[in-house]
Amino acid sequence: MGRQKDSRSRRRRERRDTLAASTELAVWNEFIVARTLLRPENYTPSVELYALATAGQYDTPRTQFSAFAMSFAMSVALIYFFAQSYVESGLSSGGMEG
């Protein structure tokens, strides 16, 4: 029994790590595609934030960068908090048997 449990937990860890790596790769691909194919006026918020951080040759406009980063993060957080109850109810109703 101990070996089976150990094997299951190892498989679970491997699956979690694979999922994390694929998610990271998908986010990186979205960033590269958006940075390569879009014009500067159509950049996504993450690419715009990167462009703002690397705009100055010797100095980064810290106050603008901080304000933009906070507004970007707060919008994502608000959407997450408002949608969380709907996602939870959908996941729990889909998992019910019978």
Image (spheres, grey):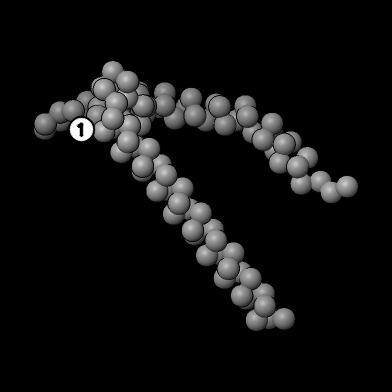
Rendering quarter of residue 50: top left
Q: Residue furthest front?
A: 37
Residue beneath the point at 29% across and 26% down: 38
Q: Residue furthest left?
A: 58
Q: Position of residue 28 (x, y in %)?
A: 36, 43
Q: Amino acid at mark 1?
A: Thr
Residue beneath the point at 55% across and 64% down: 13
Q: Position of residue 46 (x, y in %)?
A: 35, 31
Q: Position of residue 34 (x, y in %)?
A: 33, 32
Q: Nearer the viewer, residue 72 or 86?
A: 86
**Relative to 10, 72 lies left or right:** left
Residue beneath the point at 48% across and 25% down: 75
Q: Nearer the viewer, residue 69 or 9?
A: 9
**Relative to 89, 25 lies left or right:** left
Residue beneath disc 1: 54
Is residue 38 visible in the rendered structure shown here? yes
Under circle 1, the secondary element is loop
Q: Residues within 10 Å of mark 1 (few under 14, many from 20)?
A: few
Rendering quarter of residue 61: top left
**Relative to 69, 92 lies left or right:** right
Q: Residue furthest top?
A: 41
